[in-house]
Amino acid sequence: MIHSTAIIEDGTRLGNNVSVGAYSIIGPEVEIGDDCWIGPHVVISGRTRMGSGNRIFQFASIGEAPQDKKYAGEDTALEIGSGNTIREYVTINRGTASGGGITRVGDDNLFMAYSHIAHDCQVGSHIVGANGATLAGHVEVGDWVIFAGFSGAHQFCRIGAHAFLGMYGGVNQDVPAYVMVSGQPPRPRGINAEGLKRRGFDKDQIRNIREAYRTIYRLGLSRDEAIERLQERVTQQPEIQPMIDSILTSQRGLLR
């Protein structure tokens, strides 16, 4: 399962049934779980640990040093979950000492060609990053987010669960859970209703989330006023809690 031209350095730990393609290089601190497929010409370096069933295609660079001028060779890491598909030329960098030291990626994600995850990002599960999607350093992404082609997030932004960023949309403020962003410059356009249908949300839940969006963005309320109204409903409408949480934890302010 290991091609004769691949370089597996001393100290590398490979699980069962791992395949490594031609001319790939895997560094001495890398740990790869069972049933992973590493294509040709892949480089995996640094203190990188990944779970089982990941597929990494040619020319991807995983776990390389962060693109941060302050980085001075500190011992930092990258953690990747299981069941991810990482396509051609994807780059995922390990963390920085000042940013917590670890870049994390969850499970069952699809990162298409040329997408990038920078140092210290905390990325959830079931995410799609289409071609050229880019996350700057320290970005936090909830589960089930979709990044369309060439979309991205400024450093320290937070993207809530089930959000959708449209093509070429680069956001520089936080996006609450469920919100769909598109245009240039990108602006909130409603909720990701189609995505929610696909994930099993029923009509009542989607209606409640849509009304919560209206409360935040369409009624001219202050942030605190909108949150107060939403908190009055959350006992009967628990599906809006992720939207409330993503607003309360916002650090860069909401994209409007």
Image (tube, helix red, strand yellow):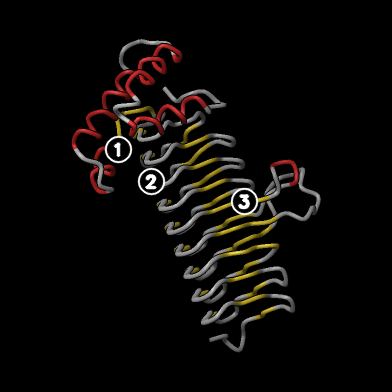
| Residue 25, x across and y down, in percent | 64, 74
| Residue 206, x across and y down, in percent | 24, 34
Residue at the farthest bottom position: 4
Quick check: can you spot residue 27?
Answer: yes
User: Separation of disc 1 and disc 2 at Cα?
Assistant: 10 Å
Which residue, given by chain and number where applicable, does mark 3 sit on?
A: 103
Identify residue type, mark 1: Asn
Secondary element under disc 2, as helix, strand or loop, is strand
User: Separation of disc 3 and disc 1 at Cα?
Assistant: 27 Å
Q: Quadrant of the C terminus?
A: top left
Please indicate whether residue 70 sits to the left or right of residue 51 in the image: right
| Residue 21, x across and y down, in percent | 54, 80
What is the quadrant of residue 223 in the picture? top left
| Residue 241 to residue 131: above or below | above
Secondary element under disc 1, as helix, strand or loop, is loop
Secondary element under disc 3, as helix, strand or loop, is strand
Which residue, given by chain and number where applicable, does mark 2 sit on?
A: 146
User: Separation of disc 3 and disc 2 at Cα?
Assistant: 19 Å
Identify residue type, mark 2: Ile
Q: Residue at x 67, y 79 (%)?
A: 8
Identify residue type, mark 3: Thr
Which residue, given by chain and number where applicable, does mark 1 sit on?
A: 192
Q: Residue at x 45, y 13 (%)?
A: 224
Residue at the farthest front position: 235
Q: Nearer the viewer, residue 100 or 240?
A: 240
Sequence-first disc among 3 and 1? 3
| Residue 72 to residue 176: above or below | below
Query: Are dots 1 and 2 in contact, CB under 8 Å?
Result: yes
| Residue 200 to residue 226: above or below | below
Mark 1 crowdedness (10 Å alpha carbons): few <14, some 14-19, many ≥20: many
Q: Residue at x 31, y 12 (%)?
A: 219
Sequence-first disc among 3 and 2? 3
